[in-house]
């Protein structure tokens, strides 16, 4: 049966605290994207997250905490270098995959013997976690496969009638999900790039990047189960264009027979907005500022659908720093449609 979904403001946070303690799911903002949280120690509560999102049962959840003191209870023995990373990067967009303790129900870790943990860098999220005084399992608060929500209204678009409450904290900061770092192997390995970059992590430890990060579309057996699904994709077909002559290539493609009669759009850097004819153009921000592009990406992908476009071309960005996370999400959204210019 459908539930009524209410949106509350930060000064009504107590309602969210109460629901979490009662084993319900609540959507709340973090510095990355909106999360859909439930008590991580309560298997039934966590089952509610999978049901609301339509999330495959083999895709594990990230557990959110507000204090380093909570870690010990949730994990088994781990490499001390992980402590250095916690001290340096928490609170922040870095999820550490560690051996799990018996307190974490199997549903949270999707049957793996590891668990991903992070401390979000967002006042409202931290206050919610602290007042509930629980570890909270929280994936992105979208229907599985669609672009992650960066505003309360995105959560409502996807989960209206499926969850009781959304805490509206305004637009999120980073706009892409956390970096997922496997700390159960040496060197530690990035399974999903995010706000904490390889360059930053490498200042503290030797870091490997899993090849799936650079893979288009679906990977059959990734170390991070979530990365095998088509992700972050709007209903419109996404065509990612890379190389030195991107604008020229997109204009050529847009006027080719393959795309005739279809409603076309392009996500372009601010410098190139005038370069296109016959397409609806969306501004990703300056070419050399992938951080701005990352913060706009999911909202733009949702806007593309709202405008009823059939196809959206996307200009590739450079892959360094936060650009690695941006390009990873774009490759996943594009599936097999990655074209070199
Ligand atoms: P989401 O919560 O929607 O941002 O997705 C969480 C991501 O973290 C997915 O890609 C998961 O596969 C990954 N993840 C969570 N827990 C683990 C784990 N124990 N081992 C590997 N990857 C994980
Ligand atoms: Mg997600």
Image: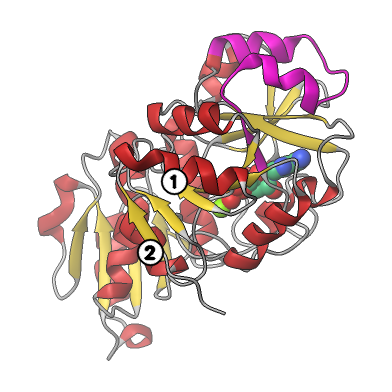
Q: Look at the image and tell me whether residue 315 can be seen.
A: no
Pointer 2 local density, CA inside 10 Å: few below 14, some 14–19, many at least 20: many
Q: Cα distance, mark 2 to mark 1?
A: 18 Å
Q: Which mark is residue 15?
A: 1
**How far across and how far down the image is residue 281, in percent?**
18, 63
Q: Look at the image and tell me whether residue 81 can be seen.
A: yes
Residue 116 on the magenta span: no
* Residue drawn at (71%, 64%) of the image: 56
Ligand 1 visible in quadrant: top right
* Residue drawn at (75%, 46%) of the image: 42
**How far across and how far down the image is residue 265, in percent?**
26, 70
Q: Foreground residue, 260 or 61?
A: 61
Say whether marks 2 and 1 touch (CB < 8 Å): no
Q: Foreground residue, 328 or 251?
A: 328
Sequence-wise first label, 2 or 1:
1
**How far across and how far down the image is residue 164, in percent?**
48, 61
Pointer 1 local density, CA inside 10 Å: few below 14, some 14–19, many at least 20: few
Q: Foreground residue, 186 or 39?
A: 39
- In the picture of the structure, the residue carrying the numbered disc 2 is 156
**How far across and how far down the image is residue 121, in percent?**
45, 25
Instruction: Give residue 33's quadrant in the image.
Output: top left
Q: What secondary structure is marked by label 1?
A: helix
38 shown above or below 193: below
Question: Magenta stretch?
Answer: 62-88
In this view, the residue farthest toward the bottom is: 261
């Amino acid at each position: 049966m459908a539930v009524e979904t209410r949106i509350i403001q930060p000064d009504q946070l107590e309602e969210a605290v109460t629901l979490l303690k009662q084993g319900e799911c609540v959507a709340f903002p973090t510095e990355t994207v909106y999360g859909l949280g439930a008590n991580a120690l309560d298997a039934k509560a966590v089952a509610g997250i999978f049901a609301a999102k339509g999330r495959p049962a083999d895709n594990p959840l990230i557990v959110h905490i507000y204090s380093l003191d909570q870690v010990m209870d949730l994990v088994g023995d781990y490499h001390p270098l992980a402590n250095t990373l916690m001290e340096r990067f928490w609170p922040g967009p870095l999820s550490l995959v560690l051996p799990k303790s018996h307190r974490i129900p199997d549903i949270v870790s999707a049957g793996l013997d590891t668990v991903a943990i992070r401390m979000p860098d967002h006042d409202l999220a931290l206050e919610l976690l602290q007042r509930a005084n629980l570890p909270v399992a929280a994936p992105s608060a979208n229907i599985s496969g669609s672009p992650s929500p960066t505003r309360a209204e995105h959560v409502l678009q996807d989960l209206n009638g499926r969850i009781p409450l959304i805490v509206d904290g305004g637009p999120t900061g980073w706009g892409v999900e956390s970096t997922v770092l496997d700390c159960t192997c040496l060197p530690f390995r990035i399974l999903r790039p995010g706000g904490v970059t390889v360059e930053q992590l490498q200042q503290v430890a030797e870091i490997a990047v899993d090849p799936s990060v650079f893979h288009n579309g679906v990977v059959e057996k990734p170390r991070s189960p979530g990365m095998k699904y088509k992700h972050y994709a709007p209903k419109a077909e996404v065509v990612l264009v890379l190389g030195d002559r991107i604008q020229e290539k997109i204009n050529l493609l847009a006027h080719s027979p393959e795309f005739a009669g279809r409603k076309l759009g392009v996500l372009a850097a601010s410098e190139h907005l005038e370069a296109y004819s016959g397409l609806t153009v969306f501004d990703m921000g300056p070419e050399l500022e992938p951080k701005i592009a990352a913060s706009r990406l999911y909202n733009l992908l949702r806007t593309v659908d709202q405008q009823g476009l059939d196809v959206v071309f996307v200009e590739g960005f450079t892959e360094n720093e936060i650009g690695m996370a941006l390009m990873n999400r774009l490759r996943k959204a594009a599936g097999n449609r990655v074209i070199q210019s």
